[in-house]
């Protein structure tokens, strides 16, 4: 019995040795060339990615493709007015500006604070002279009026002295009217000078004489003298504005509708305008105008004149255009291509591009609607 048991164990061991020699293990080659092992196939299967599961993708779609030309134009205004020192007497000293750039001013609104000094002796002299002249004029007028009344009564009574009275009346009346006019003008001139000095003494600000936005203010220092008619600044009306592009642009044509956009960090403003210019990019260079002028009318008055504005014009517009996001299109030595999953492999597909805007690329040939492309 023991022999039989030992013999069974020996047979079992022999069988196990035979099996391990026939069936390959994890380190046993399947083919004689040694290229592929079972464990290599397993690892490779794990490393091969399914594009739909692991890659970012974009789908080719149809839609409206637009491309814009943008530039920063210059804003100009036709209706300008100038601010200046309107005080013609005394010594005017600048203190500080009340208005600032971009402010809207109505007639009489303050522009800057001032200090005015006048000759007090001159004021007193004028006041005294006006009073004296008025008194003298009153006496002269009273005397002349009495004589005229006397001559008129003699002439009305008739008699031998009537004709002489009529002659004296006419002469006196003529000279009286001339002298009265002369003296009154002299008194009025002194009165105007006196009023100007007194008013200047009370004036603490210089004001705007026209409505408009402040575009420019001259630089003054505190205490600086301001002569009569000294230039202070420029104001303009924004409802009479224009936009121009220096040297023009090939993208602009007469009558073309354009957009104006401004974002000053607080508010976004938009306006539609029309190109009004003799510039025509289809003409020889020697015949092209100096600039493009775009008219926006009253829409421009909503824009901040101190901030940059952007002009936009659509020069490419395609309906039902094939498009894909810009990030899905690549370039290889001047040729454009996308990446697609073809039979489980990443494959470059070269395409013909019609253009690109800020977000999309227009595909003319090489793709179809619904194609899925990969993103690197």
Image (tube, rainbow, N blue to C red):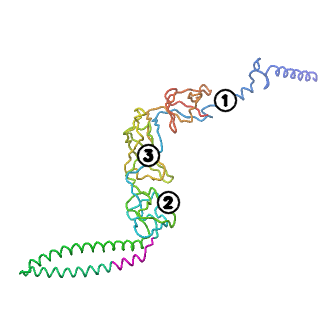
- Given residues 63 and 327, the one toward you in this image is 327
Q: Earlier in the sequence, mark 2 or mark 3?
A: 2
Residue drawn at (45%, 42%) of the image = 246
Q: Quadrant of the N terminus?
A: top right
* 217 to the left or right of 177: right
Check disc 1 and report the residue beneath it.
48
Q: Is 125 covered by the magenta stretch?
A: yes
Instruction: Categorize mark 2 by other alpha carbons within 10 Å: few (<14), some (14-19), many (20+).
Output: few
Q: Nearer the viewer, mark 1 or mark 2?
A: 2
Q: Residue furthest right?
A: 2
C-alpha gap between disc 3 and disc 1: 52 Å
Quadrant in the rendering for residue 236? bottom left
The magenta stretch spans which residues? 116-129
Check disc 2 and report the residue beneath it.
219
Q: Is 80 covered by the magenta stretch?
A: no
Instruction: Categorize mark 1 by other alpha carbons within 10 Å: few (<14), some (14-19), many (20+).
Output: few
Instruction: Categorize mark 3 by other alpha carbons within 10 Å: few (<14), some (14-19), many (20+).
Output: many
């Amino acid at each position: 019995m023991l022999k039989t048991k030992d013999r069974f164990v020996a047979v079992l061991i022999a069988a196990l040795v035979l099996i391990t020699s026939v069936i390959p293990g994890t380190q046993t080659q399947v083919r004689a060339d040694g290229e592929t092992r079972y464990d290599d196939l397993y690892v490779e299967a794990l490393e091969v990615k399914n594009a739909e599961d692991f890659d970012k993708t974009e789908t080719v779609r149809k839609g409206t493709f637009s491309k814009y030309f943008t530039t920063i134009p210059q804003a100009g205004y036709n209706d300008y007015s100038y601010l200046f020192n309107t005080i013609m007497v005394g010594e005017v000293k600048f203190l500080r500006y009340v208005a600032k750039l971009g402010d809207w001013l109505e007639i009489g609104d303050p522009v800057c604070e001032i200090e005015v000094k006048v000759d007090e002796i001159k004021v007193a002299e004028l006041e005294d002279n006006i009073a004296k002249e008025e008194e003298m004029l009153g006496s002269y007028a009273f005397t002349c009026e009495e004589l005229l009344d006397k001559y008129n009564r003699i002439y009305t009574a008739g008699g031998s002295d009537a004709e002489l009275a009529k002659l004296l009346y006419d002469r006196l009346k003529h000279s009286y009217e001339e002298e009265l006019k002369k003296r009154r003008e002299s008194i009025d001139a002194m009165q105007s000078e006196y009023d100007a000095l007194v008013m200047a003494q009370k004036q603490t600000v210089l004001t705007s004489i026209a409505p408009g936005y402040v575009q420019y203010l001259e630089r003054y220092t505190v205490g600086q003298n301001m002569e009569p008619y000294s230039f202070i600044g420029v104001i303009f009306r924004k409802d009479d504005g224009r936009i121009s592009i220096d040297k023009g642009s090939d993208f602009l044509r007469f009558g073309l509708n354009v957009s104006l956009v401004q974002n000053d960090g607080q508010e976004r403003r938009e306006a539609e305008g029309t190109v009004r210019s003799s510039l025509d990019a289809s003409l020889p260079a020697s015949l092209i105008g100096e600039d493009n002028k775009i008219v926006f009318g009253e829409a421009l008055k909503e824009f901040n004149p101190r901030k940059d504005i952007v002009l936009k014009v659509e020069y490419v517009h395609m309906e039902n255009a094939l498009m894909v996001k810009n990030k899905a299109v690549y370039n290889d030595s001047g040729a454009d291509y996308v990446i697609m999953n073809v039979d489980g492999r990443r494959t470059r597909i070269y395409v013909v591009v019609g253009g690109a805007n800020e977000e999309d690329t227009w595909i003319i040939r090489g793709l179809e609607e619904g194609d899925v492309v990969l993103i690197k």
